[in-house]
Image (cartoon, rainbow, N blue to C red):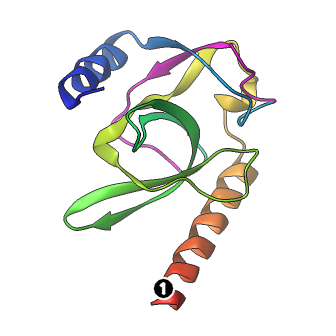
């Protein structure tokens, strides 16, 4: 998907939301394989939010946000699927389409518990610390 198409989708996602179909089980049981979810674009995202973004392979991916960090004058997002141990490759925040706000999903995919948000912050801090110690 090219950046222009992503910008047009994001514009629609800001106004009315975008329905997309989940493919895979890495976010189950909150998002089941083949579930239809609604994505809406926001101006800011919090750790724990479940985001849909354009990954490095040009595919739309829906995973949980661990945190954001600056790099080379851009803001990047670190995400991770709930059923995997390691985070995804960081993506620029400009690649975010939006977050899950409805559809065929568990209520905790929309209303993120504070315990989950704190766990995401902890995982993000540990990832950054490991990265800094390797340097």
Residue carrying label 1:
132
Instruction: Decide: is 120 above or below 11.
Output: below
Q: In the picture, residue 16 is in which quadrant?
A: top left
**68 left or right of 6?**
right
- Along the line of sight, which residue is nearer the eye, 122 or 7? 7
The question of residue 131 being in magenta is answered with: no
Quadrant of the rendering where the N terminus is positioned: top left
List the single residue furthest toward the front.
57
Q: In the picture, residue 71 is in which quadrant?
A: bottom left
Secondary structure, mark 1, is helix
Q: In the picture, residue 42 is in which quadrant?
A: top left
**89 left or right of 130?**
left
**Residue 47 location in percent, x, y?**
55, 51
- Residue name at image x 48 percent, y 85 percent: 132
**Residue 17 location in percent, x, y?**
42, 13
**102 left or right of 113?**
left
- Residue name at image x 28 percent, y 42 percent: 94
Tell how many labels. Answer: 1
- Residue name at image x 30 percent, y 23 percent: 10
Crowding at mark 1 (Cα within 10 Å: few <14, some 14-19, many 20+): few
**How would you classify the magenta stretch by its main secondary structure?**
loop
- Residue name at image x 58 percent, y 39 percent: 63
**Residue 12 location in percent, x, y?**
31, 13
Instruction: Decide: is 121 above or below 115.
Output: below
Instruction: Decide: is 126 above or below 56.
Output: below
Q: Which residues are magenta?
A: 29-46
């Amino acid at each position: 998907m090219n950046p222009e198409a992503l910008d047009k989708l994001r514009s629609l996602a800001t106004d009315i939301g975008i329905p997309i179909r989940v493919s895979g089980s890495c976010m189950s049981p909150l998002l089941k394989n083949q579930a239809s979810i609604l994505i809406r674009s926001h101006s800011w995202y919090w750790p724990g939010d479940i985001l849909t973004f354009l990954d490095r392979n040009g595919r739309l991916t829906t995973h949980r946000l661990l945190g954001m960090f600056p790099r080379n004058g851009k803001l990047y997002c670190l995400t991770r699927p709930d059923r995997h141990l390691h985070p995804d490759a960081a993506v620029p925040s400009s690649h975010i389409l939006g977050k899950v706000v409805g559809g065929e999903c568990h209520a905790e995919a929309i209303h993120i518990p504070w315990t989950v948000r704190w766990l995401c912050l902890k995982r993000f801090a540990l990832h950054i610390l490991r990265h800094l110690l390797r340097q």
